[in-house]
Amino acid sequence: CSLSSPHTECCVDQECTGGGSFDQLCVNRQCVTQGSPRFTLSYFGNDNYDLVVLTPDLDFLDVDFDPLVDDVGEGAFEADKNTGLLENTFHTESIFFPPGSPFGEYVFFVDSTETNGVSEEWRVEAAFGEESMVQTGAGSSSG
C-alpha cells in the first residue's frame, strides 16, 4: 500500500486523523469512523454495492435514505469515496453510532445496485465495542 497509489486515503490507522471527537481506522484504503456499533462494507472491483442498516428504532441508514443521520441513535452514514469510478478500485461504506446508541437488534444487508460482469466479493464487519463479526458474500445479501 502506498499513499501515492490512486484512490488511496490511508494504509494504516495512524494516517486517519479527521474523525473529530471519534477515532478513525483504515479499512480497505479509506478512513472510517469508529463507533459502537459500526458496520463497514468493503470490496475491490467496479460493481456498486450499498450497505443498509436497520436500527432498533426502525430507521434505515444507507446512501439512498434522507437524512444520512439517524436522529434518535445519532448514527451516521459515511459514503464510499470512490463511488462512480469505472475501473477496478477499493470501495468502502460505513455506518457508525456513538456509544449509548439504542440497545437492541441492528439488521444489516448489502444491496447490489450495479454489476459489471461477475459480482465482486464483499466483506461486512459489524463491530460492537471490542467484539466484531464478519459476513462475506457476492451480489445482494439477505437482511
Image (spheres, rainbow, N blue to C red):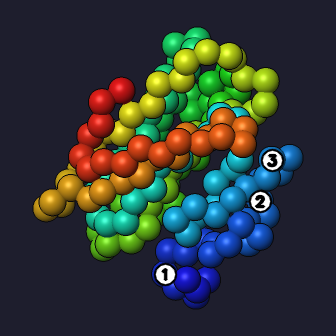
Q: Residues within 10 Å of mark 3 (few under 14, many from 20)?
A: few
As helix, strand or loop, the secondary structure at mark 2 comes to loop
Q: Quadrant of residue 120?
A: bottom left
Q: Does 96 sit above or below residue 101?
A: below
Position in image of residue 109 (x %, y %): 39, 34
Rounded to the nearest angstrom, the CA distance separating label 3 from label 1 is 26 Å
Which residue is pictured at 62% across the width and 24% down the height?
Answer: 70
- The quarter of the image holding the N terminus is bottom right
Q: Does 55 sit above or below residue 18?
A: above
Amino acid under label 2? Gly
Question: In the image as oriented, which residue stretches furthest toward the right?
Answer: 21
Residue at mark 2? 18
Position in image of residue 67 (x %, y %): 56, 28
Q: Which mark is residue 69?
A: none
Seen from the viewer's position, the closer of residues 84 and 4 is: 4
- Can residue 16 be seen in the rendering of this structure? yes
Residue at mark 3? 22
Residue at mark 1? 6
The residue mark sitting in front, 2 or 3, is 3
Rounded to the nearest angstrom, the CA distance separating label 1 from label 2 is 20 Å
The residue mark sitting in front, 3 or 1, is 3
